[in-house]
Image (spheres, grey):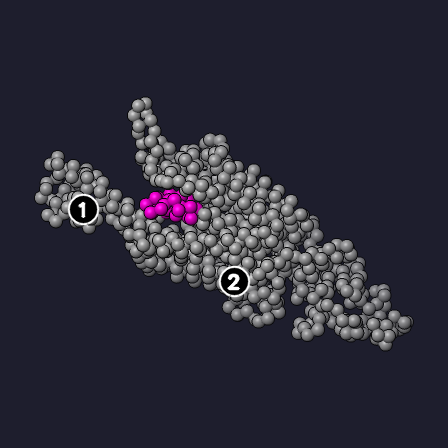
Amino acid sequence: MPKNSKVTQREHSSEHVTESVADLLAHEEPVDYKRSVLNVTGETWDKQKDGEEELDAENRPAWNSKLQYILAQIGYSVGLGNVWRFPYLCQKNGGGAYLVPYLVLLIIIGLPLFFLELAVGQRIRRGSIGVWNYICPRLGGIGYASCLVCFFVGLYYNVIIGWSIFYFFKSFQYPLPWSECPIVKNGSVAVVETECERSSATTYFWYRETLDISNSISESGGLNWKMTLCLLVAWSLVGLAMIKGIQSSGKVMYFSSLFPYVVLVCFLVRGLLLRGAVDGIMHMFTPKLDKMLDPQVWREAATQVFFALGLGFGGVIAFSSYNKQDNNCHFDATLVSFINFFTSVLATLVVFAVLGFKANIMNEKCVVENAEKILGYLNTNVLSHDLIPPHVNFSHLTAKDYNEMYRVIMTVKEGHFKELGLDACLLEDELNKSVQGTGLAFIAFTEAMTHFPASPFWSVMFFLMLINLGLGSMIGTMSGITTPIIDTFKVRKEVFTVGCCIFAFLVGLIFVQRSGNYFVTMFDDYSATLPLTVVVILENIAVAWIYGTKKFMQELTEMLGFRPYQFYYYTWKYVSPICMAVLMTASIIQLGVSPPGYSAWIREEAAEKFLFYPTWAMAILISLIILASLPLPLVFILRQFHLVSDGSNALSVTYKKGRMMKDISNLEDNDETRFILSKVPSETPSPMPTHRSYLGPGSNSPMEMSTAPNGRYGSGYLLASTPESEL
């Protein structure tokens, strides 16, 4: 420092110096402001810990490329729901008309909240626990609740990957094992398995050969060893992909994110060449405009938008925390949101092209079976030959000819028509049979593929696609657990990841007993929906109303280099919280109106039957919701009543590089402005401005004093522009 500087003069003089902080710092040697810290916390300064945190921030892993990051976010957000949930909702809620409420809600709820999570993760560069502790310590329970929900979802989601692995390995044979019903010997007579004969080959293979399912959730039936091995393989894959953090999972994403698109395009091309594919697509996109006025349609569209983007899980925040701070996360949010939407539409085209083909096959089968009945009635004189139109040829009977014959017989035999047991065999009826979830993937789609030429090849491709879709989502879900825990508690990444996978596998054994499918249904329906809705509402409130929307927009402007559209200001502050509150209310009402139950497969009847959960299962169900939500009030109470420290009860200042530090936690309020320049609090005070904060050269946002009780620290000085330095 120059000998004639004011600071040097002060050191050699006994006079009181009263220059401002800005004057003092102006004569300091140049420093790296990005690595400088004005630390305003209630913690005693620990030099070793402080150095470790600085080193941790500098050495934080980063994505190898922007492409790797985008593929990771796409792989996380595009999952099994895009393939087997969205097409079902589209068909159920008005076909092409359903796309309108979905797109509207994607724009006013999905995109703003997705952008919000990307922005806070990238800005603060921590997992969900660290992010929400930083923004509002009293709402720090948001991060812990997200981790719990991720754990619950990961438990059963990986079971679905295990099922896909089982089907994948079973696909390497011709004919496919679910193409025909098995033959069993009854003494010297070979007969078709009764359960299969009364249902279908694909249904039997799913419920009996794969799950070996029990008749109810109360009948455990012991472990299914085949599914146990598949679950072990699934957790091994996840563990290997996650063990090195984004260094390993990022490389996996190149394949797991792109391969599903290759398969979907191949299936679409193949599907469009199948007979009847156009019927399925036309049925899909024929809009039923009256459905748009149904509130239930909007509720289901909002729920699908919410889960499709993975909001509230913490995976989005975890992935974005490995970005550089000048990354354009607004572009990322828009790109990933609309890629997710177009993937859903692409998957819907594929599903209904294939289901249109299947509907034509089943309709032809119906026509043949009922034509044989009519021939029997003609031969036994139950029906007169005069009822059959002269142009009808039973050896080449078309669906149109059968429908004409069916209407004539129904008109003439009006009084005794039901006794004949004839079916209408309408293609529309087949297309209207809604299937979703496992019913679509493991029953309807597998049945359609048995009619494909080279069916094993398509089956291998389909289930490999499901494995990759599931794996991409599982990596994001597990990152929602590992990243915040490793950031917060500084545990070893490899040890924690392996331990987490082993523990999850052991707990997940509940899903691979014979009644395990019923537990998957329970967790899928109740473990995440309500807790995540509450989590996202609180995330929105924490940023928009506690941290401050204007302040957040200003920080985004500094981070991105441009000011985000005012659209986000109004959606974050008003539109999204209101919409999410309405969605939460509708979800609670839906839970109250719809009695908690599940579809059980009854072996003796070879059919599904709706059953209510027993008392002990209801206790588990309620416990899941309470446990996932418990961190929210618990952390709030602990920090509100100072049972645990949130860093807001004392004030210390650390200035790195210059290593200027003094603890003033015991100073009186009147002395807090004197500590930097005075040797003791009683000395002459310096006029420290209470509204400006020095942020480095070229900054247009000088120092501001924040005394908001709900800010980052609760009281004291706030350096909002460099949050990464304060963690």
The segment highlighted magenta reads 435-463
Residue drawn at (45%, 47%), measured in percent from left and top? 464
Whole-percent x, y for residue 416 in the image: 16, 39
Q: Quadrant of residue 200?
A: top left
Give the position of the C terminus as an image quadrant.
Answer: bottom right
Q: Label 1 amino acid?
A: His
Q: Quadrant of residue 623?
A: top right
Residue 333, label in figure: 2
Whole-percent x, y for residue 368 in the image: 22, 42
Q: Secondary structure at mark 1?
A: helix
Whole-percent x, y for residue 359 in the image: 30, 48
Residue drawn at (67%, 48%), measured in percent from left and top? 491
Determine crowd level at label 1: few under 14, some 14-19, many 20+ residues with C-alpha closer than 10 A.
few
Q: Which residue is mark 1?
A: 396
Q: Label 2 amino acid?
A: Ala
From the viewer's perspective, tell me whether residue 525 is left or right of residue 721: left
Of 675 and 223, the residue lying toward us: 223
Distance in Å between CA atoms under marks 2 and 1: 56 Å
- Determine if the magenta segment contains residue 147: no
